[in-house]
Image (cartoon, grey):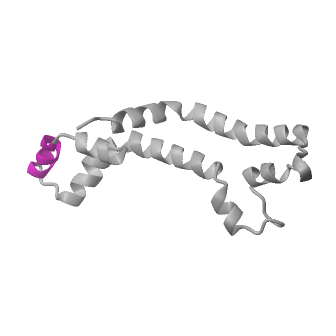
Amino acid sequence: MFVGFVKSIPLEIEEAAAIDGCGPVRTFFLVVLPMLKPTLISVGILEIMWVWNDYLLPYLVLDINQYRTIPIQIQYLKGSYGTVDLGATMAIILMAIIPVIVFYLSCQKYIIKGVAAGAVKG
């Protein structure tokens, strides 16, 4: 998303900043970075949602007996021979889904702006 958005920034904006006396670093922080705000926020939101739902890395790294993330706990609710406690499983799945839904709904306008800004073909 970053590459698509940065490529869509007209070169004239950077040239105008250079004419006004900005160097490359100052141009980035004063011109390009404020324009990247929706993209930065949407990438951050998507990254938070990805980390929240991650299964493989915590499974490999954490001590399973002491620390269990929600996706790992859902996996361990399956009993032997395929028996499943559906009530506990659905409760934990609901606990895992509600924060993501609330977070997404509160940040939805930033996600839409950022994805649309980074989806420019060129």
Instruction: Name, please, the residue furthest toward the front.
Output: 81
The reply to whether residue 79 is visible in this rendering is: no
Q: Tell me where residue 18 appears, x and y as whole percent.
A: 12, 52
Q: Tell me where residue 72 appears, x and y as whole percent.
A: 75, 54
Compared to residue 21, the image places residue 100 above or below, namely above
> In which quadrant of the rendered view does residue 61 lie?
bottom right
Q: Nearer the viewer, residue 42 or 14?
A: 42
Q: Is residue 18 left or right of residue 120?
A: left
Q: Which residue does the image show at 63% across and 62% down from the upper left?
A: 57
Q: Which residue does the image show at 73% across and 50% down from the upper left?
A: 71
Q: Nearer the viewer, residue 37 or 3?
A: 3
Is-magenta flag for residue 92? no
Give the quadrant of the C terminus. top left
Q: Tell me where residue 62 appears, x and y as whole percent.
A: 72, 67
Compared to residue 81, the image places residue 109 above or below, namely above
> In which quadrant of the rendered view does residue 112 lie?
top left
Q: Is residue 41 left or right of residue 80?
A: left
Is-magenta flag for residue 18? yes
Q: Which residue does the image show at 84% across and 42% down from the upper left?
A: 89
Q: Tell me where residue 44 appears, x and y as whole percent.
A: 49, 48
Q: Is residue 23 left or right of residue 93?
A: left
Q: Is residue 113 left or right of residue 70?
A: left
Magenta residues (range): 11-19
Give the quadrant of the N terminus. top left
The reply to whether residue 109 is visible in this rendering is: yes
Q: Mainly helix, strand or loop, the magenta region?
A: helix
Q: Nearer the viewer, residue 1 or 60?
A: 60
Instruction: Name, please, the residue furthest toward the left.
Output: 19
